[in-house]
Amino acid sequence: MDTNSPIPSVLMATTNEDLLEDLLRLAAAASVTPHVESDLLALRRNWHACSLVVIGRDLAERLARAQPAHRPGVVVVGSTSDGDDLYRCAFDVGADAVCRLPDDEPLLAGKLADALDGVDRAAVTLAFVGGCGGAGSTTLAAAVAVLGNRRGFRTMLIDGDPLGGGIELALGIEHDPGDRWPKLLNASGRVSAAALRSALPSVDGLSVLSWDQSDVTVLPPDTMSSVIGAAQRSTDLVVLDLPRRADPAVEEGFIRSTATLLVVPSDVRSVAAAKRLSGPLRAVAGDVRVVARESRPGLAPIDVATHLSLPLATKLGHDRNLPTAMDQGHFPLHPRSPLARTATTLLDLFPPPQLTPA
């Protein structure tokens, strides 16, 4: 292995050309570029160089006789016809897993994606939903994502509402290149976190997944689950903007969230509308809290939360300049603005677990 080149995350070792072809196909599907060896000495020399080592049965038998040092992240691969000998080889080299191809292709594909993504993360995931139409949940979701990104958290903003106004318009990136939801409709199983981040449009380092102008209005729940999972593995903070309507994909977003913020204007009609949503929301979301948006005249924030039988996260003040600025393609987030103060409070309530270089 060239010591002047970046170290690959995966080492594949086999003398079986047919097996190697299958392994390289799975690696390509996971966006992994492996280092390949067909020599026992080279395999032993690079034994500790990669996070995942995938060994064909042919070399595993020879490696076992050399009594390699134990290390995590070793998979022995063979065919469904190899029988118990495959497990014996795996035991002798201290492997973590055995994959019989083609039956165990999904298992190996997942391990390849894990190696590319690194250790699974525990990203804070905040879902925003309006208690009624025009509540301002999209604007607040964007503000939390922008502020989290400014703080140095690796952040992804996901627009889960195909019929909404569009987060891209709020951020002024609707014409930027990158993938949108329709490109990901066939995503299921393990999605590469690194590949997802690199494919999305971004603004100042903030990755954004939104919609294009196609007729797609519904997401498969497997797609939503896979994409959110990839986002959680590659970020400190995931922000979801979700619609009020109930469908399996939207429910998946609420289920996978650390907390759901129900944004409710503090007037009687809006609270009544939110009341109809709060029950179904609590059935799928583990931690639901209210953000009471100021209305004039209106109810006190604590009264809004009490009527909905939900805890109050914070309040959102009125910013008379914000609608005009957003109509002009700007997203102002001044530190002392009501929107920034609310976003700051929410990030302080749900701090991401660690900072990562963006």
Image (spheres, rainbow, N blue to C red):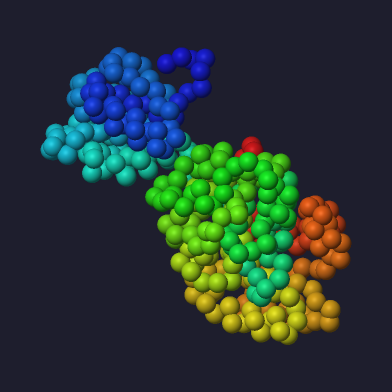
Q: Give x and y (percent) for residue 325.
A: 83, 57
Could one spot residue 156 in this view of the protein? yes
Q: Is residue 264 above or below residue 52?
A: below
Q: Give x and y (percent) for residue 250.
A: 51, 65
The C terminus is located in which quarter?
A: top right
The N terminus is located in which quarter?
A: top left
Q: Give x and y (percent) for residue 228.
A: 51, 53
Residue in view at x 45 percent, y 26 percent: 8
Residue 226 placement, left or right of 205: left
Q: Quadrant of residue 166?
A: bottom right
- Depth check: 305 or 170 in front? 170
Residue in view at x 37 percent, y 26 percent: 11
Residue 54 placement, left or right of 222: left
Q: Give x and y (percent) for residue 87.
A: 19, 37
Q: Quadrant of residue 273?
A: bottom right
- Depth check: 94 or 304 in front? 304
Q: Quadrant of residue 199?
A: top right
- Depth check: 21 or 254 in front? 21
